[in-house]
Amino acid sequence: MNAQIANVNDETYLLLALKKEKARFEEIRNRWELRQLEYKDGFTSKEEYNRTQQEYEIALVNYQQAMLRVIFDQPYIVVEEAIKYQAESGDKKHVRLKLTNTTGGVLDYQKLLESEGEIFTEDLMPDRINNVFVSLINIEDNTIISKPYERKIPSIEFGKSVRIDFELLRDVESVRISMVYANNTSTKDVYLEKDATANTVEIVSAQFSQEAELGSNTAYNMQLERFSSEDNIYYLEVVNLPRQITHTLVEQGSSARLSSIKFTKGITKKNLTLTLYMPDRDDEEIVIDEPLNFYIMAVSKDKRESLGSLKDQELSPEEILNQSDGMEKLELIPRGVGKMEVVLNTLYYPVKAGESISVKAVIKNTGTRRLDNVAIRTEYPLNWNVLVQPELIRTLDVGKEDAVELLIQTAEDAGVGDMTVKVKADAIADNRSVESDDKEIRVHVEAGANIFGTLILIFLFLVITIGMVIFGIKLSRK
């Protein structure tokens, strides 16, 4: 039990352990010096001489180890810099680390060499930390997000620094730096600095390519990240976009329109929405299904003054890259709109029960995309029937029209009054279903002529007339 307590004391109180090892070393050194004299004069055996020499060498090593533990204690590496920057290609984020070996004790050991040079030599002084393994870990889910996953530093000399570079596999603001060295693992959660020397703004849009129908609008959500140490103002310019397409820029969470942004102290990211408003018709610049490439630029105040107005200018990718402090290439694909109309010249028809009427309907393509498989659909009263000729129009180009004939057959027992026949058209445009508005034809069913009843009335009229004549003749004779 005393041995366990002694070991605990040695590990816990390094100075006490050093004092004990020094006293033991001095005792054995005195004994060793005496044993050398005795052996020289022949007063001790060879075995005793060797045993005392071995004890001296062990005590010397223990004393040296205890002294080194006190002077150098535990090796330690500090993270002096953790800078996030954008690669020159513009599509990857990197982190640059500066690691410094700050293990103390070098000066103390130099003094020890001067005072006890026969015991402590320069080759005993550890001058570096070998085999340092470093990786970047995501704080949220504890996964490695650096490429390579782990870097090995062969050695770091005392008081010296090394720089290593990682590619970020996930764009984050903070990382956990893991370092393994000297049989220990050290982790530090750090907020990544921005590279102040770059003075750029990175613009990233996840939906960089979008489709938009003519007459509609579409939105690009984007994130702007500053790589600068100054609170600069950046003007936002949308270039190479046809003038027929208008746009607005707003900061997400706000309805205020923007033309410039300012990153205040502590703010390095902003989320914006670029909304494009499409014209109703295509033209030479806006061609259906033909992609349009345009750019959004962030321009500093100085550059904007030298550039002047960029409205209606067509800039090459090289000019945009050279004249902007950050840019993102976007793509817009105009899509036509399938739309049609059913035109009826007359919406009211009088008819007698059992009769039929012919109605001409014109189908017009009023959209901006070709219509396929145009068909007329009708709804009519019970026991009525409607025939459509032709039943199907295979193709109807933009701005074109075609006529169909509706033959409406009324029922024999149709009641007197107004009845309704609904007419609409449906078609396919760009694999999407298109329907027209409903049109209603009002059919007024009139009462039909009854010949038998008319004959009876005539017969009764004649009977009454003849009866009155006969009655008058008889009355005049009397």
Image: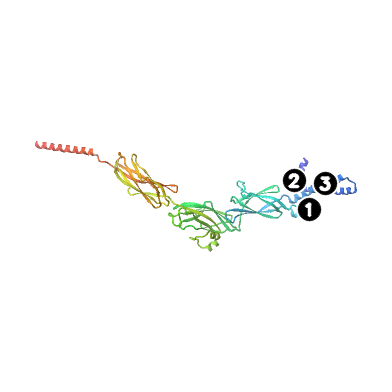
Badge 1 marks a residue whose secondary structure is loop
Q: Which of the two discs, 2 and 1, labels the residue nearer the N terminus?
A: 2
Q: Is residue 143 above or below residue 226?
A: above
Name the outermost residue toward the left. 477
Tell which of 212 and 105 is nearer to you: 212
- The answer for how far apart the CA atoms under marks 1 and 3 are is 20 Å
Amino acid at circle 3: Gln
| Snapshot colouring | rainbow
- Local crowd size for mark 3, using a 10 Å CA cut-off: few (<14), some (14–19), many (≥20): few
> Which of pointers 1 and 3 lies earlier in the amino acid sequence?
3
Q: Position of residue 166 (x, y in %)?
A: 63, 52
Q: Which of the pair 394/170 is nearer the observer?
A: 394
Q: Amino acid at mark 1?
A: Thr
Residue on which disc 1 sits = 121
Task: Indicate the position of residue 473 as horizontal and vertical percent values.
Answer: 11, 37
Q: Which residue is mark 3?
A: 54
Identify the residue under disc 2: 11
Of circles 2 and 1, the one toward us is 1
Give the structural element (helix, strand or loop) at label 2. Answer: helix
Q: The C terminus appears in which quarter of the rendering?
A: top left
**Residue 51, picture quadrant:** top right
Can you give x and y, in whole percent of width and height, for residue 74 in the image?
72, 49
State the separation of the CA atoms marked 2 and 1. 24 Å
Residue at image location 9% in from the left, 36% down from the top: 477
Q: Which element type, helix, strand or loop, lies under badge 3? A: helix
Label 1 Cα crowd, 10 Å radius (few <14 / some 14-19 / many 20+): some
**Mark number, residue 265:** none
Q: Is residue 427 left or right of residue 299?
A: left
Q: Residue at x 82, y 46 (%)?
A: 54
